[in-house]
Every structure is written in structure tokens, then in C-alpha cells.
Image (spheres, rainbow, N blue to C red):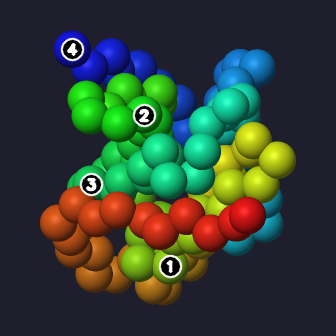
């Protein structure tokens, strides 16, 4: 059975926990997750419509966190890195001019870079 935690807060006003930290840094939404003992190949970051999900483990995967995304994110340019047991997901924010047309795409898995 998959566990699921959904936060309904915006990135600039998030109550962070010891394991998940979300903030807006300049023109990016940055999500950091402490994943002690996890191997990079066991971590999956998936963006689907207006949510980003962080999962670990093999089948069945365990959803650690599902975070709603604000309307102004540019999911096509999302990057993820995993270093020193910390997963960092960076999602650029679009300007109001860039938001005139917004089409949600099918879900996709973000490749995780790192050592």
C-alpha cells in the first residue's frame, strides 16, 4: 500500500519538516529532501499535472511527499540532484508574461544527477 502526504501550501509559505524543505529562491522553487541511506537509483521524482512526487524504494514504491505546484512553474526545465543524502529538486518559475498559455503535460520522471 502506498502512503501519500499532500501539502496544500504555496512554496513561499511552507511549514518545513526535518526531512523536507521547500522554498522559493529567486526565480526557482527548490525542494530539498533528506533521504539518509537511500541510493540514487532507488529515488524517483515524478511531475504530473500540478504535483511533484518524491518516491523511494523498489516495487512497490513509497511516496514520501507529494507537493502541489504553483501555476507559474516551468516543469520542462526541472532538475534534480542527489548528493550527501539530500535530494534537491529545482523548478524554474515563469514570469507573468510567460504564463499566457499553460498546457499541462503527461506525467514524466525527472532524471536525478549526482554521485
Where disc 1 sits, the SS reads helix
In the figure, 114 relative to 60: above or below? below
Name the residue at 50% across, 79% down: 77
User: Percent x, y for residue 69?
Assistant: 44, 49
Residue topped by disc 2? 57
In the figure, 111 relative to 23: above or below? below
- Frontmost of labels 4 and 1 is 4
Mark-to-mark CA distance, 2 and 1: 25 Å
Residue topped by disc 1? 77
Sequence order check: which comes first, mark 4 or mark 3?
A: 4
Sequence order check: which comes first, mark 2 or mark 1?
A: 2
Dot 3: within a 10 Å radius of its alpha carbon, few (fewer than 14), some, or many (20 or more) residues?
A: some
The answer to whether mark 4 and mark 3 are in CB contact below 8 A is: no
Q: Nearer the viewer, residue 37 or 2?
A: 37
**Is any part of residue 114 visible from this angle?**
yes
Sequence order check: which comes first, mark 1 or mark 3?
A: 3
Point out the image quarter for the C terminus.
Answer: bottom right
Where disc 3 sits, the SS reads strand
Residue topped by disc 3? 48
Name the residue at 38% across, 29% down: 63
Residue topped by disc 4? 1
Name the residue at 26% across, 20% down: 2
- In the picture provided, is 86 more to the left or to the right than 46? right
Dot 2: within a 10 Å radius of its alpha carbon, few (fewer than 14), some, or many (20 or more) residues?
A: some
Dot 1: within a 10 Å radius of its alpha carbon, few (fewer than 14), some, or many (20 or more) residues?
A: few
Amino acid at each position: 500500500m502506498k502512503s501519500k502526504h499532500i501539502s496544500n501550501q504555496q512554496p513561499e509559505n511552507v511549514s518545513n519538516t526535518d526531512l523536507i524543505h521547500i522554498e522559493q529562491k529567486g526565480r526557482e522553487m527548490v525542494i530539498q529532501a533528506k533521504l539518509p541511506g537511500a541510493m540514487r537509483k532507488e529515488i524517483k521524482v515524478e511531475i504530473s499535472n500540478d504535483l511533484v512526487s518524491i518516491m523511494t524504494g523498489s516495487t512497490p514504491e513509497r511516496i514520501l511527499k507529494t507537493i502541489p505546484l504553483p501555476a507559474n512553474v516551468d516543469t520542462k526545465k526541472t532538475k534534480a540532484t542527489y548528493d550527501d543524502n539530500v535530494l534537491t529538486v529545482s523548478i524554474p518559475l515563469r514570469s507573468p508574461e510567460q504564463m499566457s498559455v499553460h498546457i499541462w503535460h503527461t506525467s514524466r520522471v525527472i532524471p536525478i544527477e549526482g554521485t
